[in-house]
Image (cartoon, rainbow, N blue to C red):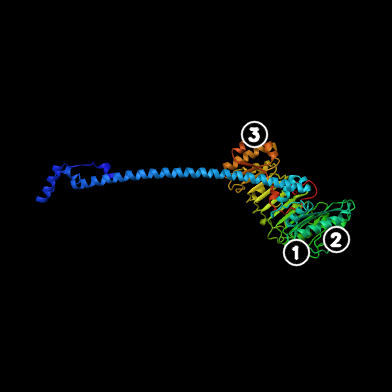
Amino acid sequence: MHAESRVRPVLRPTTAYRSSQRTIRLGQKKRRTTNKQTEFFPSFRNLRMYTVHHDISDSLHTLNTRNALNTLNALNTHRDALLDKHRDLLRQLDETTLEIRATEIKLACIHNESNAFISRLPPELLSLVFLVLQEEVPFSHFAAARVCSGWRALVNGTPLLWGNIVIRVDEKRPAGIEAQLHKLETSLARSGRYDARVLLYVYAFEHGTAHLVLRDELEYLCAPQLEYLGLYVAWAPDIALYGDVLSNTPLIFKGGAPVLTYLQVTGIAAALRPPTGSDLTILHVDGTHMADLTAQEYREFLASTPSLVHLSLLYVEIAGPLTVMGKVELPRLRSLRLRAQGNIVGSFTSVLLDPLPLDRLDTLILCDVNDLEVFDFPNVKHLSLHFCDFDVAQVGQMMLGFRSVVTLELESASLLYMALRIEGNPVWWPHLKELSVRDLDPGDAVALLRMVQGREGMKHPLGTLYFDGPSRRRAGSVLVELKSIISISRNSLRDDVRAWPAGSMVFGWVGDDDRTMER
C-alpha cells in the first residue's frame, strides 16, 4: 500500500454535497474558505481521484504478490529436483571410482604374478623407487637397476636416480676395487647430463704413509667440476713426521679445481692441500694430530681464501711468537666456529681471532673457550656458547661487546642469566628475542625464570624459549611458570648447524665425540 493511505483517511462525499459544489464553481467566483479544518484535507475532486488510484494500486499489489509466491514455489521445486539429481550423480561417481580401483588392483596382481621377482620385493622397497623419481634433494642411495628388464628400463630413463654415487675402496679387499670402479662408470653413464654427487671413501687402516700415497695419486689431477672436498687421514703410529704440516702451497689437484667451494681438512690430511681460490666459501680445518702453525702460516692460509664466508677451526693452535700483524682481507666472512683445546689460554685464542674481520661476523659459535681476550663483535646476531666457563669479568665484557645479539644458544650459564636481567640504561642485549637452552642444570632453572621475568619488566621480553628434552625434564615446576610467560618450543636443529648453508656438511665430522662440530 502507498504511504499516504496509511496516514490520510479515505473520504467519500455525499451526492448532494458534490452537486452543491459544482453549482458554486459554475455560478460564482471561488471564494477562499476560512475554515481551517477544511484546509487540512484536499479538495473533494482530488479525494475522488485518490480513492480510485488507491483501489487500483491495492489490486495490482495483491496480484504481484500472488505471482511472486507462485514463482518462488516453482523455483524451490526445481532446486530440490536438481539437488536430488546431484546426489544421484555423486553416488554414481563414487561407485565408478570404486570399480576402477578394484580393477586396477586385479590388473596389478596379474602383472605381479607374471613378474615373480618383483612380487617378492617388500612394498617399502617398491614405493621407495617411485619416491626418488624427483628432482628435489636429497636423492636416495637406492640402486634399482637389477630388478627386471621393465624396472631397468625405468631407471635408465630416470638419470636422477644415479645422482648419488658412493664408492668404498678397502685395501684389505683389493679384488673389490674393480667392481667399485665399474659401478662408478655405470653410474656416471646413467646420470647423463645431470650433476652427480660422488663420495669416495678410501679405507687404509693404520697406514703410515697413506697421505703420501694419496698425494701421489691426486697430485696432478685436474678436477674441473669438483665442488666439495673432504680429506680425513687417521693417525697411525709410524706416520711420517712431515705428514702433519698444513701446506700453504697446493699439493694435490695441481691440474686445477676451479669450482671448489667447500674444503674440509682433518688430521693428517693437512699435508694434502688442494688449490684454493676465489670460489672457496666454506673452510673447516681440524687441527687434531696436526702440527702447530706459525702466525705467519696461519695468515697466509687465510689470505689464500679471499671469498671465504664460513670458517670453522677445531683444535688449531699457533706456535712461535704471538705477534699481531693486522687484518686479513676477508670481505665476505659472515660466520665463525671456534673450538679451542681445553687448556688453551686467551692469548692463543686471540691470535686466531686477530687476523679476522670480526666486525663483519653475523654468526659466532664458541666451544671450550674459557678465556676470551677479544670482545669486539658489534654485528653478531646469532651467538652460540658451548662449555664456555667465563668468569664474572668476562661476562661483563660480553654484555658490552655483543650489542646486536638476537638469538642465543648455550648450556647452563647462571652468570649470563643474572647479567641479562640486570636493569640499567641502556639495557644489555636489547634485541635478544630467542634463547635456546641445552643441558639445563636444575640449579639454574630459577635463575632462568628470574631472567625471563626481569626482561618482561624491563619491556625487552624474549619472544621464544627453546628447550631440549633433558632441559624440559630438569626444569621441573619452573617449566609451568615459564609457559605462562613465554612461548616454549623444542629444539629441532642446533644453531651451530643452522648457521651453515644447507648441504655444506656433506661429509660430516670425523673424529672424536665433538658435540659442536659434528652433525
Q: Can residue 295 be seen here?
A: no
Residue 477 has which mark? Answer: 3
Q: Quadrant of residue 334?
A: bottom right
Q: Quadrant of residue 93?
A: top right
Find numbered disc 2 in the image and state the secondary structure of the residue it sits on.
helix
Residue pictured at 27% horizontal, 46% vertical? 56
Q: Can residue 94 be seen here?
A: yes
Q: Quadrant of residue 54?
A: top left
Q: Residues within 10 Å of mark 1 (few under 14, many from 20)?
A: some
Q: Residues within 10 Å of mark 2 (few under 14, many from 20)?
A: few
Q: Mark 2, mark 3: which one is toward the viewer?
A: 2
Query: Of the residues under marks 1 and 3, which one precedes in the sequence?
Result: 1
Residue 235 has which mark? Answer: none
Q: CA distance from mark 1 to mark 2?
A: 19 Å
- Find disc 1 in the rendering and name its residue: 258
Residue pictured at 57% horizontal, 43% vertical? 91
Contact between labelled residues 2 and 1, with CB atoms less than 8 Å apart = no
484 relative position to 441: left or right = left
Q: Residue furthest top?
A: 477
Query: Of the residues under marks 2 and 3, which one precedes in the sequence?
Result: 2
Q: Position of residue 157 (x, y in %)?
A: 73, 57
Q: Residue furthest left?
A: 27
Residue 217 has which mark? Answer: 2
Q: Amino acid at mark 1?
A: Pro
Find numbered disc 3 in the image and state the secondary structure of the residue it sits on.
loop
Q: Position of residue 41 (x, y in %)?
A: 20, 44
Residue 1 versus residue 519: which sits nearer the camera? 1
Q: Residues within 10 Å of mark 3 (few under 14, many from 20)?
A: few
Q: Quadrant of the N terminus?
A: top left
Contact between labelled residues 3 and 2, with CB atoms less than 8 Å apart = no
Q: Measured along the vertical axis of the image, is residue 251 above or below residue 239?
A: below
Q: CA distance from mark 1 to mark 3?
A: 57 Å
